[in-house]
Amino acid sequence: MTDNITRILLTDDHNLLVDGLKRSLNEADGLKVVGTANSIKECMEFLSEHPVDLLLLDVQLPDGNSIDFVPKILQGRNTLKVVILSSFADPSVIRRAIDAGISGYLLKNSSSAEITKGVLAVADGEHYISPEAEALLKEAPKHVPSLTRREREVLHLVVEGLSTKEIAARLDLSFDTIHDYLRNLRIKLDAKSMADLVCRAKDQCL
C-alpha cells in the first residue's frame, strides 16, 4: 500500500465484469485498480513485475483452478491480500479457499456496493466473507473430502476426459495403480460412477 491507496489487480476472464468492477472500485476512496489479468499465468506475471496490495481473483480461469495457486501466489508476498470473487456458492469451495489463505470471499451475484464493501474491509486488515457465503458455511456439514496431491492429479485428468489407460500413461504409473486411485476417489467423493465422479469434482471445484 502506498499513500493510503490499496493497489488492486483484477483477475477474471469475463471482460464485461472486469470493466464494471474496475469502474466501481476506482470510485471508492483509497482503492485503485492498477491492472487486470485474464488467467493465472497473466496474474503471476503481473505480480512479479508490479507492486500489488490486493488481488481480486476468480476461481475458474482458462488455465486452471486459482484456489490451487493461492499458496504459491502468497509465497514471499507477506503483505498481499487475496480476495476470491466467484460464482461458486458452495461451502466446500469456500472452505478450500479459506484454507488456502485468502482474506476474503465474495460472490459475483453481490451488488457492486457489497463487493466494494468487502474489498475495503480486507484492505483495512479484516477478513471478509460475504453474508450469503457465511450463511452457507454455517448451514453446511463440516466434512470436506481431503485429497492427496496424486489423487488431485488423477481427478483433474479424469475431468479432462482421459481414460484409465491414458491417465496411467500420462503419469507413468500402472493401470492397476490408477484403478486403485479412482476407487479411492469414488469412495471419498461418494461417487457411484466415473460420470458421477466428474460431476462431483466440478460441483465441488476440486
Image: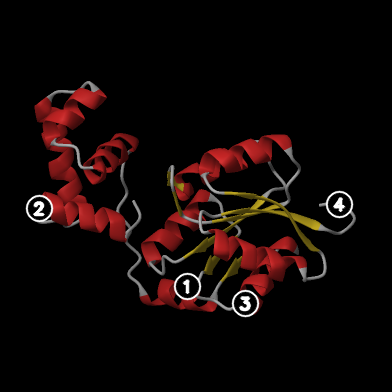
Indicate left or right for 182 with 88 as reference: left
In space, the residues marked 1 and 2 are separated at their CA atoms by 30 Å
Picture quadrant of residue 106: bottom right
In space, the residues marked 2 and 4 are separated at their CA atoms by 53 Å
In space, the residues marked 3 and 2 are separated at their CA atoms by 40 Å
Tag 2's secondary structure? loop
Res 2 label: 4
Residue 39 rendering spot, x and y as whole percentages: 52, 45
Q: Residues within 10 Å of mark 1 (few under 14, many from 20)?
A: some
Among the two numbered marks 3 and 2 on one chain, the one whose residue lies closer to the N terminus: 3
Picture quadrant of residue 179: top left
Q: Which residue is mark 3?
A: 114
Residue at the extreme right of the image, as rendered: 3
Indicate left or right for 55 with 40 as reference: right
Residue 125 visible in the snapshot: no
Tag 4's secondary structure? loop
Q: Residues within 10 Å of mark 4 (few under 14, many from 20)?
A: few
Residue 45 rendering spot, x and y as whole percentages: 62, 36
Among the two numbered marks 1 and 2 on one chain, the one whose residue lies closer to the N terminus: 1
